[in-house]
């Protein structure tokens, strides 16, 4: 991480922005600012080490709620990076930071990206390697821009930042980032629709979001007409004056300013995707074998759930006998998993795939999966809550870029309700 000076670069379609700042006690001042239209690789002088603003839609960001000592927290984060990502294990760039703590309970912000996707993105700058580059997600930049605007994070609020060809959406509450996403922007009305969908999802989970922040007066007008209390995101007056003197429009440099604060250790959160890298440590043949075994076990789990569903329509005695037999094999461990799996199987809509299922000693079930769209995630959540005896809540739903396609990775927690 940088100490006293930093260069930050942002690619916004064919538009390139660059800001160079230096640290001065608890703030920073502008050294250089440039904006290049129709940028071509090599069209601007960039030093050998710099910071790159990286699109949210090309990485995964989630909040982890962990418990334990520092060593246990570090091990849990490493396991998350090592085992729970939709990327090849030896092609992962990631970082994590504790954003709040209460005793042994920690809230950790975790971010990861595919090294292949990062390599393609840095290639747009004409770089042959991403080595030596600090890579900052745009979510981090928007969060720090909110801090510059002295937003009260204790109260739930939504923020939307519009660039030339992109949009970033962020929901904060209780001092941390609760939800974020990014996408290529078509029009402002589309952005308003995204805000409504995100806020409605939080409302269903019991959290009301009334305040909205954006860098667009036009969008704020639309948000106000939708019932939000709106505020305009701006830069500090001193920095705005310096940018105008440099010959650029300050309104386009909000994310760069937020990133600069984080890079110079002036922010609350510091995530650099290039700070850590998963090293495989497993031979390809061994890794392939492990994957094959996991596929077989998943298929067996699904098979047993179907068997139980069929048996339930025949003989209760036969069903009980099968449950006892499977319990001897360690498949049930004293929990009525056949009923749970049957209901889960029925609840999964088209366009969603479950790839991980676990339970704790309380009988709470955690499932993870991937969906082709957010609508499929919403449909699954609604189906589970309609199922008798289930109470489901969404942990997270993050858009990911797996190379040629986009998907939504999600996690849900399911509790079994007492019979009424």
Image (cartoon, helix red, strand yellow):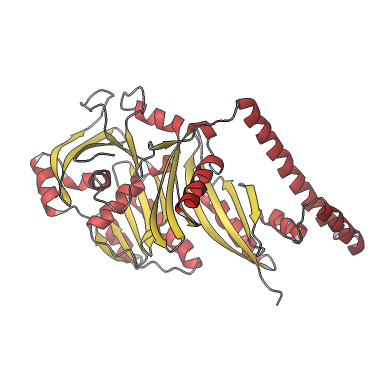
Q: Would residue 302 appear left or right of 415 to someone viewing this image?
A: right
> Residue 227: x, y in percent?
35, 68
Q: Would residue 109 appear left or right of 392 to someone viewing this image?
A: left
Position of residue 2 relative to residue 109, above or below, is above
Position of residue 219 relative to residue 49, above or below, is below
Q: Quadrant of the N terminus?
A: top left
Q: Nearer the viewer, residue 174 or 251?
A: 174
Q: For the point 23% across and 27% down, which residue is it?
A: 47
Residue 217 seen by the camera: no
Q: Nearer the viewer, residue 159 or 288?
A: 288
Position of residue 15 relative to residue 420, above or below, is above
> Residue 306: x, y in percent?
79, 51
Residue 305 seen by the camera: yes
Q: Residue furthest bottom?
A: 420
Q: Would residue 193 appear left or right of 310 to someone viewing this image?
A: left
Q: Nearer the viewer, residue 103 or 187?
A: 103
> Residue 336: x, y in percent?
76, 61
Res 38 → quadrant: top left
Q: For the point 37% across and 52% down, which residue is it?
A: 169
Res 308 → quadrant: bottom right
> Residue 298: x, y in percent?
71, 44
Q: Residue furthest left?
A: 245
């Amino acid at each position: 991480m940088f100490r006293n000076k930093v260069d930050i670069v942002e690619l916004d379609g064919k538009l390139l922005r660059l800001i160079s700042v230096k640290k001065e006690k608890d703030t920073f001042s502008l050294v250089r600012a440039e904006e290049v239209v129709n940028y071509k690789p090599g069209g601007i002088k960039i030093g050998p080490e710099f910071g790159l603003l990286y699109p949210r839609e090309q990485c995964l960001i989630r909040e982890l709620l962990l418990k334990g000592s520092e060593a246990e927290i570090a091990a849990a984060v490493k396991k998350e990076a090592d085992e729970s990502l939709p990327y090849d294990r030896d092609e992962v760039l990631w970082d994590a930071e504790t954003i709040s703590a209460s005793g042994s309970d920690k809230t950790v912000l975790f971010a990861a990206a595919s090294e292949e996707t990062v390599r393609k993105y840095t290639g747009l700058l004409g770089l042959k390697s991403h080595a030596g580059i600090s890579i900052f997600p745009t979510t981090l930049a928007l969060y720090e821009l909110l801090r510059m605007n002295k937003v009260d994070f204790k109260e739930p609020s939504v923020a939307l930042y519009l660039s030339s060809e992109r949009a970033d959406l962020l929901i904060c509450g209780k001092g941390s980032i609760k939800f974020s996403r990014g996408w290529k922007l078509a029009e402002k009305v589309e952005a308003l629709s995204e805000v409504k969908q995100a806020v409605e999802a939080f409302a269903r989970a019991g959290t009301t979001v009334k305040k909205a922040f954006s860098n667009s007066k036009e969008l704020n007008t639309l948000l106000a007409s939708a019932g939000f209390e709106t505020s305009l995101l701006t830069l500090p007056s001193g920095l705005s004056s310096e940018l105008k003197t440099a010959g650029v429009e300050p309104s386009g440099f909000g994310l760069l300013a937020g990133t600069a604060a984080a890079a110079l250790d002036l922010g609350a959160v510091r995530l650099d995707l290039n700070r850590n890298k998963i090293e495989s440590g497993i031979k390809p043949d061994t890794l392939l074998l492990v994957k094959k075994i996991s596929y077989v076990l998943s298929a067996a789990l699904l098979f047993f759930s179907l068997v139980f569903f069929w048996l339930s329509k025949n003989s209760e005695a036969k069903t009980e006998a099968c449950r006892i037999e499977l319990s001897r094999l360690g498949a049930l461990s004293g929990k009525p998993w056949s009923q749970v799996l049957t209901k889960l199987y029925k609840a999964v809509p088209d366009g969603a795939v479950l790839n991980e299922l676990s339970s704790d000693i309380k009988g709470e079930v955690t499932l993870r999966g991937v969906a082709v769209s957010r609508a499929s995630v919403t449909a699954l959540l609604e189906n589970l809550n309609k199922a008798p005896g289930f109470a489901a809540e969404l942990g997270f739903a993050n858009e990911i870029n797996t190379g040629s396609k986009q998907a939504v990775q999600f996690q849900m927690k399911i509790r079994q309700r007492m019979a009424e």
